[in-house]
Image (cartoon, rainbow, N blue to C red):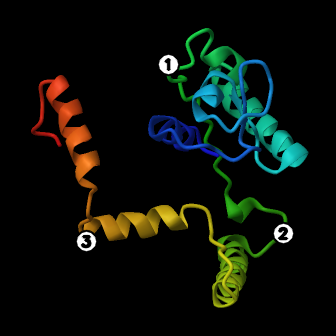
Amino acid sequence: MARGDITLAAMDGRPIPADAAIDANGQPTIDAALALKGAQLPMAGHKGTSLALMVELLAASFTGDAFAFEAAGEDSSTPTQHGELILAIDPERCSAGGGREAFLNRVEALLQMVEAETQAAEASGRSMRLPSQRRFTTRKKAEEGFEIDEALLRKCQALGESEGDTARL
């Protein structure tokens, strides 16, 4: 579960899934506010832990940024420094042969299979999507305009007024 989603749940007083986080004492919690004082749990159990460790080793070690356990220190409300490692892979140099065109054809084949599986899942009432697919769909809908709950609008306006700038709302 993304930290932003936990923060939103805490603001709204909503519970979070039982496998999303632990509190400051290391105990599983569904209380989002307690989760923010504890730690998020990785997706996919031990495999997710291994994936998270690999990403952290690459992103923090190579860039010199803080590891997660060093990032926030005592104040978990401060942002990390966002150490980012960008891997650039040239398909022309891959030993599989065929170069860029073969690589793109393989990627396209995989994405077409996932899209077909997604459509089959939706047809049977299940949900399945690619990473970022929901964000792109949401962004497209937002470009068409959106409705906002009156209470949330007032809350946003009050926040803007407390900052002395309602023009940005």
Q: How far is the residue under mark 1 from the one under mark 2?
A: 44 Å
> What's under tag 2, amino acid-wise?
Ala
Circle 2 residues within 10 Å: few <14, some 14–19, many ≥20: few
**Nearest-to-viewer mark from 1 and 2:** 1
Q: How far is the residue under mark 3 from the one under mark 1?
A: 34 Å
> What's under tag 1, amino acid-wise?
Thr
Q: Quadrant of the C terminus?
A: top left
Q: Is residue 97 above or below residue 159?
A: below
Which numbered disc flags the more N-terminal residue, 3 or 1? Answer: 1
Residue 35 rendering spot, x and y as whole percentages = 65, 30
Q: How far is the residue under mark 2 from the one under mark 3?
A: 44 Å
* Mark 1, residue position: 78
Residue farthest to the left, as pictured: 167
Q: Which label belongs to residue 144?
A: 3
Residue farthest to the top, as pictured: 74
Q: Does 64 sit left or right of 26 as displayed?
A: left
* Mark 2, residue position: 96
SS type, badge 2: loop
Q: Nearer the viewer, residue 123 or 17?
A: 17
Residue at 70% of width from left, 79% of height from top? Answer: 114
Q: Does 97 sit left or right of 30 as displayed?
A: right
SS type, badge 3: loop
Residue at 46% of width from left, 41% of height from top? Answer: 12
Q: Nearer the viewer, residue 59 or 163?
A: 163
Q: Nearer the viewer, residue 106 or 60?
A: 60
